[in-house]
Image (cartoon, helix red, strand yellow):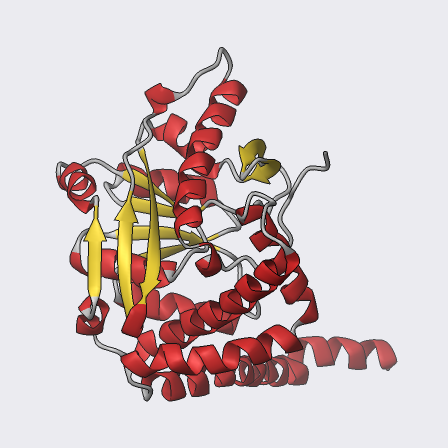
Amino acid sequence: MSKYFSASKSLGDSGPLSRAMSHFDGKVAVLPYEIGSILASSIPIGLRPKIAAIIGPVAYLALKKKRRDAFEAQRLASYGEANRSVLTRRTIEVFSSYVLYWLESLAMPRSGREKLLQNLSYEGCDDLVGYLREGHGAILATCHLGNWDWGGSWFAAYQHPLAAVVENLKPESVAEWFYSYRRELGIDPIPLDGPVATRVIQAVKDGKLVALVSDRDLSGSGVVVDFFHKRVRMPSGASVLSLRTKSPIFPAAVYLTPKGGHHVVFLDPIFPADSVGSSVAEKVAHLTQLVSTALESLIAEKPTQWHVLQPLSIERD
C-alpha cells in the first residue's frame, strides 16, 4: 500500500501540485525585480545618481563580505599604492556606482529604446560597425565597468545584432526575466552552461558581435596574466573564441557620466595574428594578456566604476 501510495503521488496528484508550486515560487522570486523595475523607471534619469549616492553608503555598511571584496579590488586597481582611507572612500563610491547600475538596469525593461540615446556619447565605434556590416562576426571583450548592460542594449538596438554570454542566474524565472528584456533590445543571451561554445561560435559565424565579460574568472581554469602589477587569473574565453573563429577582439567599456549619461569606449582591435607562441595554449595565454592589458587601461580611467564585489583570483606572491 505504501509503495503504491508513493508511486501514485509521484505520477499523479503531486505532479500538477508540484508544477503549480514551482510556478508560484518563480513568480515570487521575480516579484522584487518587478517592483524594483516599476520604482526605478519612475525615477527621472537625472535624479538616479543622487539617489544612488544616498543608498550606496548604506549598502557599503550593510554588505560586509562584498565591502571586503570591493576594497581588495580597489586596492588592486590602485596598483597597491593608495592608503586605507583613500581605498575606503573609493569603495564607498563603488557601492554608489553599483546602485546606480541597478537602478538603470531595473528601469530598462519599462523604458523605450530612445532612452538609451539620452546623454550618450561614444568613441572608436566606426571601425567596429564597419567591420560588422561587411558581414564579419567579432568578439567584444568588456568588464564590470559602468553599465555594460546599457552599452550592449544601445549597440544591439542601434548598431548591430549582439549576442552576450551571461552568468547563470537562479532561479530560472529570474534568469528568464532578464533574458526577455535583453531580447527585446536585440541581445541574444547565451547562458554560461550547456553547449555554450557551439552557440558562441555559431553566433560569430552568423556575423554577430559576441560580448564576453572578461575581467573575472568564474571557472577557475583561466590564464594567469599581469594585471595592475599583480598575477591574476583571467578568463580566456575571448582568446579561445578569437583563435577558433579567426575573428578580432574589440575591448570596450561603458562609463557612467554625470546626470545619468553614458560614454562608450571601443579600443583598437586585437587580432588572432597578434598571438605569439608555438602552441595553442601559448597563443591563448598571449592573447588573454593583451585583452587584460586593454581592460586594465579602461578600468584605470574610472576605477570606482569597476563593480567587482566578489573575490578576484589573485595569485599569491
Please state the horizontal and vertical placement of residue 179, each as a whole percent of the image.
39, 66
Judge whether 176 appears above or below 213 on screen. below
* Image point (39%, 27%), residue name: 244
Query: Does 127 sit left or right of 108 as displayed?
Result: left
* Image point (48%, 24%), residue name: 286
* Image point (59%, 46%), residue name: 81
**Along the line of sight, the residue nearer the viewer: 202 or 94:** 94
**Along the line of sight, the residue nearer the viewer: 223 or 56:** 56
Please state the horizontal and vertical placement of residue 119, each as a whole percent of the image.
21, 68
Residue 44: tell me if it is visible: yes
Q: How many marks?
A: 0
The N terminus, quarter of image: bottom right
Judge whether 236 appears above or below 172 on screen. above
Q: Image quarter for residue 141?
A: top left
Judge whether 132 appears above or below 170 on screen. above
Query: Does 269 sit left or right of 169 as displayed?
Result: left
The C terminus, quarter of image: top right
Please state the horizontal and vertical placement of residue 143, each as a whole percent of the image.
44, 50
Q: Image quarter for residue 178?
A: bottom left
Residue 30: tell me if it is visible: no
**Along the line of sight, the residue nearer the viewer: 302 or 20:** 302
Please state the horizontal and vertical placement of residue 194, each as a whole percent of the image.
52, 48
Which residue extends farthest right? Answer: 2
Judge whether 312 appears above or below 93 on screen. above
Query: Does 104 sit left or right of 1 as displayed?
Result: left
